Amino acid sequence: MRFALAGIVALAVVGVASFFVMRHIGTTEALGNARDLTRVVGRGIVEPNLNEALLRGKPAAVRRFDRIMHRQVLGDPIVRVKLWTPSGRVVYSDAHGLIGDRFTLGGDEVASLRTGNVASDVTDHSLPENRYESGQGELLEVYLPVQTPAGSPLLFEAYQRFGSIASSGHDIWLAFAPALIAALVVLELVQLPLAASMARRVRRGNEEREELLERAFDASEAERRRIAGDLHDGIVQDLAGLSFSLSADAERLDSTGSSQAADALRRGADQTRQSVRQLRSLLVELHPPRLREAGLVAALSDLLAPLAARGIDTRVDVRGDVELAPKTEALLFRVAQEATRNASSHAGPTRVEILVATAGERASLTVQDDGRGFTVDDAALARGKGHLGLQLLRDLADDAGAALEIESEPGQGTRVSVQVERR
């Protein structure tokens, strides 16, 4: 729809611009036609009928020339004609009151006489030589230099109705308008199926991307489960067995009086059990079993348990209905996991709180700590630089289409919040 509306707007803009351009072209062409008409009349009718008697103002010559002008020239569109000498004397006009009068020639008239070119201008009704044209409306004056048979130069001036010229320009524009409008409409109609096809491709691309993200998420979960299973059934069991063996060997050495060797074995057993505890914590992070069995709140409580064991004040606050889709629960848990890991490893907090809330079709999770805090560089995160843990949070949220906010100031703690669709 946006593409179609943009095309309609473009069609309107091009159509309006074309209207003014074509109207200008039509008017220019009509002015050219007016000059051509004056040239044809001047060369074909006026000049062949000029003589010296007309130039001297002989009444018989004037009457003869007047009959020719009324029969062959005056009418539509030419409504007035004048003949001028270079000095500004009116040799002939169909308004006989002007014959013999003298006026100052304008710049266009003088230039036309000097260059021999056809010139034109809109009639100025305030000039005294145009006093008889005041009732004719807007007129166009066209000037053409002519000569008598004896070579005397004269200036032929034809007055044409400007309305007829504008009408001619309008007719020229109308002749091209249907083809122009039809071409623009056809172009728009051709583009609409292309736009629809592009929209379908974009939609399919988005659907395929979502499917790929879902598959990647499922594959990630499956890989986490596989790694957790391998660790639990392999190295964790081996280390647990090793710790028991070391403890048993230490007891035997105690009975033989080798106390130093026994103490070394006990230390090795303790370190092995500590490694087993760390691996089991890692297994919970890789694949929290209670997330599927007992739900998000229980898994978050398990997540905060190691921090509480270290003396950190922890709390999980739930507001609203937290019945969420499994993928939404997994995302919120991963964000909480990464945020608490960052707080535990870098912030040195005394208190960590997790708030889970729902509102309508949105679910949110907020992790707040009172640790050291830091300066958030959004530009660096956008470029994939800066703190690795924060970048992991960004990637998690972006892959799921969630909105992530990180607020922190040195000495003011850190607040990490994420919002996502419930389903």
Image (tube, rainbow, N blue to C red):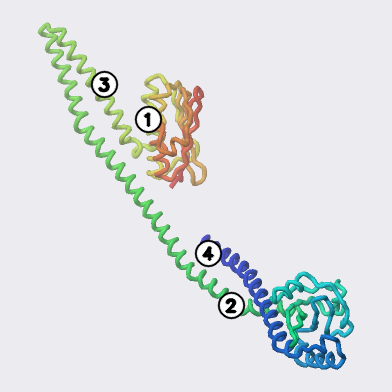
Amino acid at the residue labelled 1: Leu
Is label 1 in contact with label 4 (beta carbons under 8 Å)? no
Per the model, the C-alpha gap separating discs 4 and 2 is 22 Å
Residue 19: image location, x then y, percent: 63, 70
Secondary structure under the numbered disc 2 in the rendered image: helix
Q: Which mark is residue 303?
A: 1
The disc, 2 or 1, on the residue closer to the chain's N-terminal end is: 2
Per the model, the C-alpha gap separating discs 1 and 3 is 18 Å
Evaluate whether residue 355 shows in this view.
Answer: no
Per the model, the C-alpha gap separating discs 2 and 3 is 88 Å
Residue 391: image location, x then y, percent: 40, 36
Secondary structure under the numbered disc 4 in the rendered image: helix
- What residue lies at 12% left-to-right and 7% top-to-bottom? 258
- Residue positioned most to the top: 257
Q: Quadrant of residue 27?
A: bottom right
Side of 393 relative to 34 (left or right): left
Per the model, the C-alpha gap separating discs 1 and 4 is 52 Å
- What residue lies at 15% left-to-right and 20% top-to-bottom? 245
The disc, 4 or 2, on the residue closer to the chain's N-terminal end is: 4
Secondary structure under the numbered disc 3 in the rendered image: helix
